[in-house]
């Protein structure tokens, strides 16, 4: 059993449950067929004694196993599956709708399958995703100057207290705190691995993080308190990072040029600069980063600075892994970290190929 993985029995249980928890971090190799699969593969489950587990696609291939044609473990799953595409189209058509599991059954969909598909792609269930879209709709209404009560009904909430509670849980503040034009702005940024929240002033980006990250509400509340308020809008820095993220997920950009404003200690700032120097497609260990900044014994401090990075992706804290090659912690979820690393390796490979073609 690979030392980077949990006990085989735990992974075998995940395989039987088709759990997405180990998506991109563990694969099952079936000795009787010579095939390896994702743990979420819908194929018939092998016996425990016929299973081996590996942490990477490369390890499975090196062991002589072929990729499954059904779950396609070598295929980048940033691309959505048909269930996700179908329901995203339904959300686009009626973003104010309050969905239930009964609505999914009416469309001939199994709620548990929908739940797994959305967790696999976005780290949240479809109902949570739909609720976030309603909050986004309410936020845009407030940005247009709508009254809070109008934004509440637009978001599909009959109860004012329910709307305020949902809004606060999502963004860490009441709707009224998002109506003052104090020069600090917030907006949503859609990505293939879940919505993000961007905060900027007129000249630079302050925060970029995934909507479902637990620490985001507190970070937003702190900026609101420091700034005296915030309003919904998309100034140039947010527009620019939205376009750059679109290119990034399309596989045609590995470097971001959006102007940024980072607030942190001198040590944290040094770590964040070092993260931006890690080339696209490469990773470094926490120990290596500590050595790069000239503080070889400050490995834990580097990890703390990494965890408090306010600008996900463009300050690439996801490129830092454990000394043993394990993914270790990532505020946006290890499944996202794996996807980002995989995406960036593809971008780097494409860049190398293009450079060789030009020679």
Image (cartoon, rainbow, N blue to C red):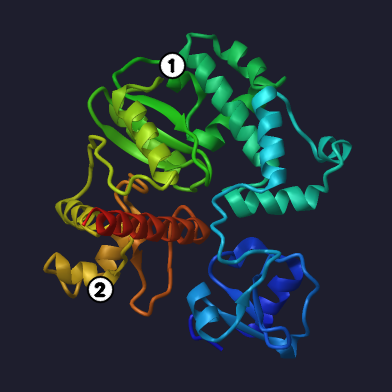
Q: Quadrant of the C terminus?
A: bottom left
Give the numbered dot on residue 100: none
Quick one: which residue is furthest to the left in this view?
294
Give the SS element for disc 2. Answer: helix
Tell me the residue at 61%/64% (across/down): 21
Q: Residues within 10 Å of mark 2 (few under 14, many from 20)?
A: many
Give the SS element for disc 1. Answer: loop
Residue pointed to by mark 2: 287
Give the numbered dot on residue 179: 1
Q: Residues within 10 Å of mark 1 (few under 14, many from 20)?
A: many
Residue 175 at x, y percent in the picture: 51, 22
Residue 69 at x, y percent in the picture: 68, 67
Position of residue 18 in the picture relative to residue 122 (left or right): right
Q: Are marks 1 and 2 in contact (CB under 8 Å)?
A: no
Residue 267 at x, y percent in the picture: 17, 56
State which tag comes first along the sequence, 1 or 2: 1
The label nearer to you, 1 versus 2, is 2
Position above or below: 109 against 14: above
């Amino acid at each position: 059993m690979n030392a980077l993985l949990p006990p085989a029995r735990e992974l075998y249980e995940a395989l039987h449950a088709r759990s997405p928890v180990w998506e991109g971090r563990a694969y099952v190799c079936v000795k009787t067929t010579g095939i390896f699969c994702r743990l979420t593969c819908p194929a018939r489950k092998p016996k425990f004694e016929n299973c081996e587990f590996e942490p990477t696609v490369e390890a499975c291939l090196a062991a002589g196993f072929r990729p499954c044609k059904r779950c396609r473990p070598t295929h980048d799953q940033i691309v959505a599956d048909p269930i996700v595409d179908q329901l995203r189209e339904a959300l686009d058509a009626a973003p104010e709708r309050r969905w239930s599991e009964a609505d999914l059954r009416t469309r001939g969909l199994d709620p548990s399958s929908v739940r797994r598909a959305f967790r696999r792609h976005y780290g949240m269930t479809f109902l949570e995703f739909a609720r976030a879209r309603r909050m986004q709709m309410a936020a845009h209404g407030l940005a247009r100057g709508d009254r809070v009560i109008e934004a509440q009904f637009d978001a599909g909430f009959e109860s004012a207290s329910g709307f305020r509670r949902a809004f606060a849980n999502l963004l860490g503040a009441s709707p009224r705190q998002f109506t003052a034009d104090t020069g600090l702005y917030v907006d949503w940024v859609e990505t293939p691995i879940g919505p993000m929240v961007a905060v900027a002033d007129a000249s630079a980006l302050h925060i970029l993080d995934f909507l479902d990250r637990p620490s985001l509400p507190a970070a937003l509340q702190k900026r609101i308190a420091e700034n005296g308020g915030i309003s919904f809008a998309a100034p140039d820095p947010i527009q620019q990072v939205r376009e750059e993220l679109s290119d990034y997920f399309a596989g045609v950009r590995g470097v971001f040029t959006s102007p940024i404003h980072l607030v942190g200690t001198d040590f944290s700032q040094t770590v964040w600069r070092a993260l931006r120097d890690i080339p696209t497609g490469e990773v470094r260990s926490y120990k290596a980063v500590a050595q790069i900044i000239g503080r070889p014994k400050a490995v834990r401090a580097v990890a703390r600075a990494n965890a408090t990075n306010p600008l996900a992706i463009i300050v690439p804290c996801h490129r830092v892994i454990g000394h043993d090659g394990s993914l270790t912690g990532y505020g946006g979820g290890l499944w996202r970290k794996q996807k980002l690393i995989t995406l960036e390796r593809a971008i780097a490979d494409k860049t190398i190929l293009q450079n060789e073609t030009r020679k």
